[in-house]
Amino acid sequence: MKTVLCVMIPSLFILTACATKNHHTITPPTIVKAPDFSKLSTKSCRGGEFINTPAVLKLDKRGKVTDVYGLTIQDKKLAKQITTQFKKAIYTPYKHNGVPIARNLDVAIRLKCPG
């Protein structure tokens, strides 16, 4: 069910603004326990460099990360370390009308390699 709110200036017969509110909203997750990327150690990550990669986190109904995919890092050891840290993180779950649901969370990562 949607509610549409429109503001009109009757004297000018102009529709000035219109907004739609969806009653079936999905509340996004928030971080409860953040992943710790402070101890990434790998040969391909030189001190001071930045690593930029997208990732998709699969969250269950409790906000636990059950899978990580979509990393664009060539170094498999580094990708495994990042995946492990994401799986240790905890988020509040997505909620649809107040009910927790399982859903994917798209994130962009920018990490500075330890120097």
Image: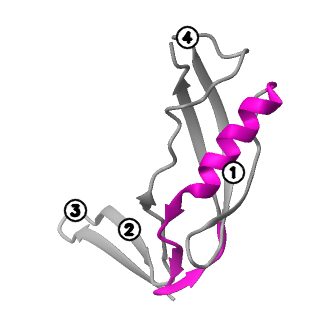
Q: Secondary structure at mark 4?
A: loop
Above or below for 69 versus 22 = above
Q: Nearer the viewer, residue 7 or 27?
A: 27
> What separation in Å lies between label 1 and label 4 (alpha carbons)?
26 Å
> What separation in Å lies between label 3 and label 1 (alpha carbons)?
49 Å
Residue mark closest to the camera, 1 vs 2: 1
Identity of the residue drawn at 36% across and 66% down: 18
What is the three-letter code of the residue carrying label 1? Answer: Val
Identity of the residue drawn at 79% across and 25% down: 75
Q: Which mark is residue 56?
A: 1
Identity of the residue drawn at 28% across and 66% down: 13
Residue mark closest to the camera, 2 vs 3: 2
Above or below for 100 versus 9 = below
Q: Nearer the viewer, residue 76 or 5?
A: 76
Callout 3: few (<14), some (14-19), or many (20+) C-alpha neighbours within 10 Å? few
Q: Nearer the viewer, residue 110 or 66?
A: 66
In primary-sequence order, the first of circles 3 and 1 is 3
In primary-sequence order, the first of circles 4 and 3 is 3
Discs 4, 3 touching: Cβ within 8 Å: no
Callout 4: few (<14), some (14-19), or many (20+) C-alpha neighbours within 10 Å? few
> What separation in Å lies between label 4 and label 3 (alpha carbons)?
64 Å
| Residue underneath mark 2 | 19
In primary-sequence order, the first of circles 2 and 4 is 2
Q: Confirm whether the magenta stretch covers residue 79.
A: yes
Q: Which residues are magenta?
A: 74-103
| Residue underneath mark 4 | 47
> What separation in Å lies between label 1 and label 2 (alpha carbons)?
31 Å
| Residue underneath mark 3 | 12
Q: Secondary structure at mark 1?
A: strand
> What x and y, as percent, mark residue 19?
38, 68
